[in-house]
Amino acid sequence: MEVWNSTLGSGFILVGILNDSGFPELLCATITVLYLLALTSNGLLLLLITMDSRLHVPMYLLLRQLFLLDFFFTTAVTPKAIMDFLLGDNTISFGGCALQMFLALTMGSTEDLLLAFMAYDRYVAICHPLNYTIFMSPKVLWFTVSTSWILASLSALGHTIYTMHFPFCLSLEIRHLLCEIPPLLKLACADTSTYELLVYVTGVTFLLLPLSAIVTSYTLILFTVLRMPSNEGKKKALVTCFSHLTVVGMFYGAATFMYVLPSSFHSPRQDNIISVFYTIVTPALNPLIYSLRNKEVMGAMKRVLGKHISLSHSSD
């Protein structure tokens, strides 16, 4: 079979969900609105947590990392998809494809590990409140954050380099929203079965192990909450945990479908829908889930806005 030299070729063609949709204009408008919502909400909460000193506690500093990840994750994918549709040019260079894959894998894997650390934070806060400042000290917090970023970046770099080293067939159409491992391997002209097994093992390790830690943490939290004498304390703990579990369910459901389920369960259309969910929909919804019913966040917003309004009035 004639192959394309991946190191010299001009690039790939991304045939994403907008190209296969029956109503591409409406879908493009919806994706654009969701992207703007993701940028605005994540950016606003990043600014809010940074500016309000009362939110400089482990829970909100971890949330700040989550909002940062969602901000960059959706930005690595969505503007390219929107501009491709508007300009009618779906090409992406070899280097651009590799960069997009690396960024998406890094952000996704970091978020995966971060969600597990966030569950641990809630476990310590609810089950061991007297030792919270010890178990979630600034050193522990930044160790967990840096570990998440480093492990995710190394894994993403290894997968990106190895995926892009394959020779690809003459048809360069990637039937997917972005450059990811599964759709790219379908274009390879070499035997990828061993590497697909490695991707599966990595997916199970990066997804199911943190998920097991999250399930264990929230099981212990539930037992502790049910023994609380105060109904107000129960309600506050359950609301906080429900927000986190909602995000966990959305993220791990989509990621498990993409990287753990066998390829026989996949179709290009299903993969496209799932990719829209975790690259666009989830980053737009996460800030709303964490902030709308959170009294501390709403209080911080009032304080910051009140401070700036009073400063503007005094300057006048």
Image (spheres, helix red, strand yellow):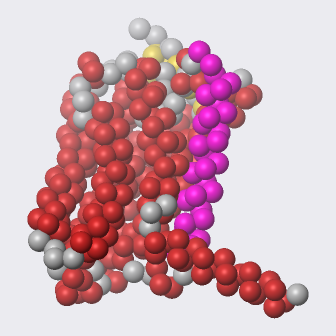
Q: Is residue 134 above or below residue 112?
A: below
Magenta: main secondary structure:
helix
Residue 88 lies, in percent from the top left, at 71, 23
Q: What stretch is highlighted in magenta?
A: 22-50
Q: Give how far across and how far down residue 256 sits, in percent.
A: 28, 38
Picture coordinates of residue 54, whole percent (x, y): 47, 84
Please report the residue visible at 63 percent of the width from the left and 57 percent of the height from the top: 40
Q: Quadrant of residue 138?
A: bottom left
Residue in the picture at 21% in, 32% down: 197
- Considering every residue shown, the one lying at the far right of the view is 316
Q: In which quarter of the image is residue 95?
A: top right
The quarter in which the N terminus is drawn is: top left
**Is residue 163 visible to us here?**
yes
Name the outermost residue toward the bottom.
314
Q: Look at the image and tell me in which quarter the C terminus lies.
A: bottom right
Is 283 above or below relative to 262?
A: below
Above/below status of 235 relative to 286: below
Residue in view at x 35 percent, y 38 percent? 254
**Is 117 inside the magenta-drawn segment?**
no
In the image: residue 116, left or right of residue 299: left
Q: Where is residue 194 in the image (x, y as percent from the top left)?
A: 21, 29
